Amino acid sequence: MYTFKKEERLCNKGLIDSLFHSGSSFLCYPYKASWRLVDNAGQYPVQVMFSVAKKRYKHAVDRNTIKRRSREAYRLNKQQHLYNFLQASNKHIILSLSYIGKDIAEYDFIEKKMVKLLTQLSEQISKVNDQAV
């Protein structure tokens, strides 16, 4: 339940290209989330990637710290705020979370914002779902 396996990571270059060319996005500071509904019925309802701009954070240790905190917040909150909704509606998405904050945030702040982002994402997916029906 509280795992983050290799199959949950978004690595496929073709999927990443399609995500940024024809996906939807929204801002939930300090993140920019890009997402897209996909057809492939994999084992997990979401494939996700995390990114931090090299332009803003020159040191790899800073980028890695932010990504580590983001992955941990995602891992602990994905089930109740996103997976349950997606499994109930039988949807699969690909997701990119880009950190655009100006400073390295503490874990508590990142977790609070991650919960808000996942809730907002569920709402957006349900809107798209309602429009399609």
Image (cartoon, grey):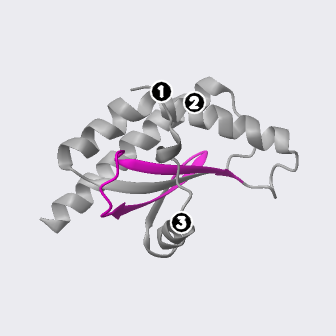
The percent coordinates of residue 69 (x first, y second) are: 64, 32
- Tell which circle, 3 or 1, labels the residue nearer the N-terminal end: 3
Which secondary structure, mark 2?
A: helix
Which label was assigned to residue 72?
2
The answer to which of 7 and 18 lies nearer the viewer is 7
Tell me the distance, in whole angstroms, between the alpha carbons under discs 1 and 2.
6 Å
Question: Dot 1: within a 10 Å radius of its alpha carbon, few (fewer than 14), some, or many (20 or more) residues?
Answer: some
Helix, strand or loop for the magenta stretch, by majority: strand
What amino acid type should be assigned to the residue bearing mark 1? Answer: Leu
Q: Kindly indicate whether the residue at mark 2 contacts the one at mark 1 (C-beta within 8 angstroms).
A: yes
The percent coordinates of residue 78 (x first, y second) are: 41, 35
Which secondary structure, mark 3?
A: helix
Q: Is residue 40 one of those drawn in magenta?
A: yes
What amino acid type should be assigned to the residue bearing mark 2? Answer: Glu
Which label was assigned to residue 11?
none
Q: Which residue is mark 1?
A: 76
What stretch of residues is rendered in magenta? 27-52
- Which quarter of the figure is the N terminus placed in? top left
Total numbered badges shown on the rendered structure: 3
The answer to which of 113 and 15 lies nearer the viewer is 15
